[in-house]
């Protein structure tokens, strides 16, 4: 079996005048949430083999705080994750089928819809994924990332 771990970025500051959404930083609350997410991953033995992260500042800062707890992990910025649909996220994850535990750090509604799609087969059956939340999905080693292929084995939020 292999795992896809989805991490929604932690709470971010609101956009300031003239500030692009992609440049929003984490709030103080968000930084604490991201560190707590790192502790949860470490304590549950869920340190990833590879991380794919949206290029948005808030996702990068979330990942930085997580890695401050779990230690260095191979990581790549993946522009397609920003503002992605569940289908786009599934395609991105499917390109890394050879990774035992893949962590995707991104945004809603894409992440919560991907979790629902992989678990139930329908992206409209999502229940929400709060800032800083983690969904752990387990699927067969050789399986394509497609609807209904995974089991949701854990869900956590700060």
Image (cartoon, rainbow, N blue to C red):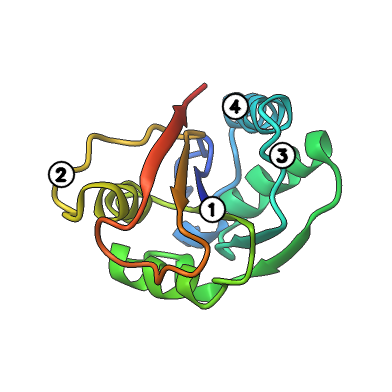
Image position, residue 104 (x, y; %): 54, 56
Q: Is residue 18 visible?
A: no
Residue 135's spot in the image, x, y percent?
45, 39
Number of marks in the image?
Answer: 4
Q: Residue at (56%, 58%) from the top-left corner?
A: 23
Given residues 11 and 15, the one toward you in this image is 11
Q: Earlier in the sequence, mark 2 or mark 3?
A: 3
Residue 66, which numbered label? 3
| Image mark for residue 33 | 4
Q: CA distance from mark 2 to mark 4?
A: 26 Å
| Distance between the alpha carbons at the discs numbered 1 and 3 | 24 Å
Cα distance in 3D space between marks 2 and 1: 24 Å
Between discs 1 and 3, the one toward the N terminus: 1
Mark nearer the N terminus (1 vs 4): 1
Q: Residue at x 80, y 55 (%)?
A: 73
Q: Is residue 141 above or below residue 28?
A: below
Q: Earlier in the sequence, mark 4 or mark 3?
A: 4
Which one is in front in this view, the residue at disc 2 or the one at disc 3? Answer: 2
Tag on residue 125?
2
Front tag of 1 and 3: 1
Secondary structure found at label 2 = loop
Is residue 74 found left or right of 48 in the rendered image?
Answer: right
Please rate how many residues cluster around mark 1, counting C-alpha atoms within 10 Å: few if below 14, some from 14 to 19, many from 20: few
Q: Which residue is mark 1?
A: 1
Q: Earlier in the sequence, mark 2 or mark 1?
A: 1
């Amino acid at each position: 079996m292999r795992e896809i771990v989805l991490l929604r970025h932690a709470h971010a500051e609101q956009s300031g005048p003239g500030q692009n959404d992609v440049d929003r930083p984490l709030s103080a609350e968000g930084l604490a949430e991201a560190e707590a997410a790192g502790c949860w991953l470490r304590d549950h033995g869920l340190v990833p083999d590879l991380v794919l992260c949206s290029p948005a500042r808030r996702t990068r800062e979330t990942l930085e705080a997580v890695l401050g707890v779990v230690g260095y992990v191979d990581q790549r910025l993946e522009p397609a994750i920003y503002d992605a649909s569940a289908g786009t996220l599934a395609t991105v994850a499917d390109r890394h089928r050879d990774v035992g535990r893949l962590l995707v750090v991104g945004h809603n509604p894409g992440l919560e819809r991907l979790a629902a799609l992989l678990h139930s087969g329908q992206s409209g059956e999502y229940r929400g994924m709060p800032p800083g939340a983690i969904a752990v999905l387990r699927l067969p080693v050789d399986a394509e990332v497609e609807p209904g292929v995974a089991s949701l084995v854990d869900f956590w939020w700060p």
